[in-house]
Amino acid sequence: MKRQSVIDFIKEEFNVDGEHLWMTFPDYIVFRNPAGGKWFAVLMDVGRDKLGLDGEGREDILNVKCDPVLIGSLIKDRSSYLPGYHMNKNSWLTVLLGGNAGENEIKDLIALSRELTEKK
């Protein structure tokens, strides 16, 4: 799934616009759950070396809040998923947008993340 497709899906499905919070990282976009303001998705482009991946260049990633059991099973596939980059690795998952994860799978993870950040 491409970066713009993620942005479009979140806008269409949840009516949420992304926020650019850091001037030094203008391509980083945070999506908040309107019910409480908690983050449910973060789009970033990060150096492959910082992600522990081989090769040079940058990788588009999506961080989503996730069930810890699901994280454990998904990160076995390092071509699609990693422990949450710069987030709590017990409750956040990094999706490699250039990886093998299917579009519907990514959309389901975004929806789960939004649900997990609902105000209790």
Image (cartoon, rainbow, N blue to C red):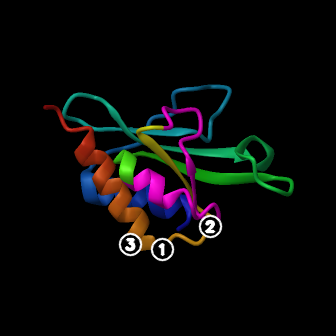
- Whether residue 85 sits left or right of residue 58 in the image: it is left
Q: Quadrant of the C terminus?
A: top left
Up-down relation of residue 25 to residue 95 (above or below) = above
In-image side of 65 versus 25 (left or right): left
Q: Position of residue 113 (x, y in %)?
A: 33, 48
Q: Which residue is mark 3?
A: 104
Res 7 quadrant in image? bottom left
The rendered magenta stretch, by its main secondary structure, is classed as: loop
The residue that mark 1 highlights is: 102
**Residue 110 circle label:** none
Looking at the rendered structure, the kind of residue marked 2 is: Gly
User: Dot 2 lies on which element?
Assistant: loop
Task: Name the residue rendered at 19%, 34% in the picture.
Answer: 35
Part of the protein shown in magenta: 70-89
Give the class, few, some or many, for how many residues have Cα within 10 Å of label 1's Cα (few <14, many ≥20). Answer: few
In the depicted structure, whether residue 26 falls above or below residue 73: above
Label drawn at residue 99: 2
Residue 79 magenta-drawn?
yes
Depth order, front residue of 34/81: 81
